[in-house]
Image (cartoon, grey):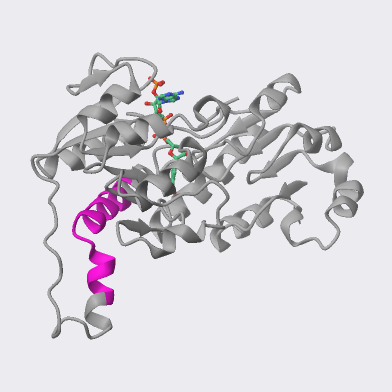
Amino acid sequence: EILQTHKLLDRCEKALAERYTVHKLHEAADKEALIKSVAGKIRAVAGGNVDGALMDKLPKLEIIANFGVGYDSIDTKAAKQRNIRVTNTPNVLNDAVAELTLGLMIGLARRIPQGDQFVRQGKWPKQSFPLLTELNGKTVGILGLGRIGKEIATRCQAMKMRVVYHGRSRQHDEPYIFYDKLIDMARDSDWLVIIAPGGKGTEKIVSRQVLEALGPEGFIVNVARGTLIDEAAMLELLQSKKLGGAALDVFEKEPQVPEGFFALDNVVLSPHQGSATHQTRNKMGDLVVANIVAHFAGEPLLSAVV
Ligand code: NDP
């Protein structure tokens, strides 16, 4: 029997229901009562949002199959201590997230959403749209040159941008210039693209100082997690034009977005939709199911993180 912690795609839910008895925690009116009634039978969790306390309530739990490559909503340390496996959904979403990133960059540089509003609101015959900027010839600093970061880098090169990166370690096989200090990369970049994991290790790593180093001509793009940026400082710097612009797919307390952003025309906002296409979400769902199936067949997991 398995516990599902949030809504999954129909195809994924169907595949799970064909194989297992599924209990849907997110649909339960009384979540504690549901957990109590099935606790001794649950051997797998499909979805995220699992802390040590929930693990302790499920003594037979063997595996948590997260829907998403970022698994910051699962306490992996607690899982390891309890001998519980954790899987995620890497690679299948790289292209979708990289495409959205480039879309956000062009959208911000050329203010495409604002242009759309300008036309729809009948302003075009009365005033001219401002002159803006281009991506080509600019330097983009990528924070997190991982699976998705590399796909973003390839696409930025196609836009004739110069690519540099920061991470905890230099990747010797990569052709791009490495910065061991994020603040130095921000100072030297026109664009800062955030695509490193969330969680404690990266909390507010894009600090006020980093944002100030990016400066009034600099653009920030966050397609990782809201927790990586000091959001309050970013809003303040955008309002005072000490930061050039921001394209944001993720937020600290999403789906709640600080209203201050709504009044800014140097910002493009997106509802955490990096992987939100039919083709990618289906592949992610298939991987969730494949990991659970592999586990109970005693086969190697396809994408284990614990
Ligand atoms: P990877 O693990 O492949 O890459 C992560 C990169 O981040 C690595 O290059 C790593 O380099 C770097 N990194 C990790 N920790 C730190 C740190 N403390 N400081 C600096 N750099 C660090 O992950 P993916 O590319 O597959 O995914 C990245 C993230 O993107 C996910 O964790 C997820 O949160 C987010 N995401 C967002 C989506 C959306 O819808 N907006 C969709 C999919 C993913 P090094 O080890 O050298 O530090």
* Residue 82: % across, % down: 76, 23
Query: Horizontal placement of 4 versus 161: left or right?
Result: right
Q: Quadrant of the C terminus?
A: top right
Using the image, determine if residue 190 lies above or below residue 119. above
As for residue 139 lying within the magenta part, the answer is no
Left or right: 137, with 108 as reference point: left
Identify whether 13 is placed above or below 147: below
Q: Main secondary structure of the magenta part?
A: helix
Please determine whether, in this image, residue 278 is positioned above or below residue 235: below
Ligand 1 lies in quarter: top left
| Residue 15 position by quadrant | bottom right
Residue 291, percent from left and from top: 57, 38
Q: Quadrant of residue 289?
A: top right
The reply, left or right, for residue 283 in relation to residue 216 is right
User: Residue at image x 42%, y 34%?
Assistant: 208
Residue 158 x/y as whole percent: 12, 43
Quarter of image, res 26: bottom right
Count of numbered marks: 0
249 with respect to 216 (left or right): right
Residue 112 on the magenta segment: yes
Instruction: Tell me, yes or no, if residue 114 can be seen here.
Output: yes
**Residue 225 visible from this viewpoint:** no
Front residue (pair 178, 289)? 178
Q: Nearer the viewer, residue 223 or 97?
A: 223
What stretch of residues is rendered in magenta? 98-117
Give coordinates of residue 272: x percent, y percent: 46, 54
Question: Residue drawn at (54%, 46%), measured in percent from left and top?
Answer: 252
Residue drawn 56% across the image and 46% down it = 67
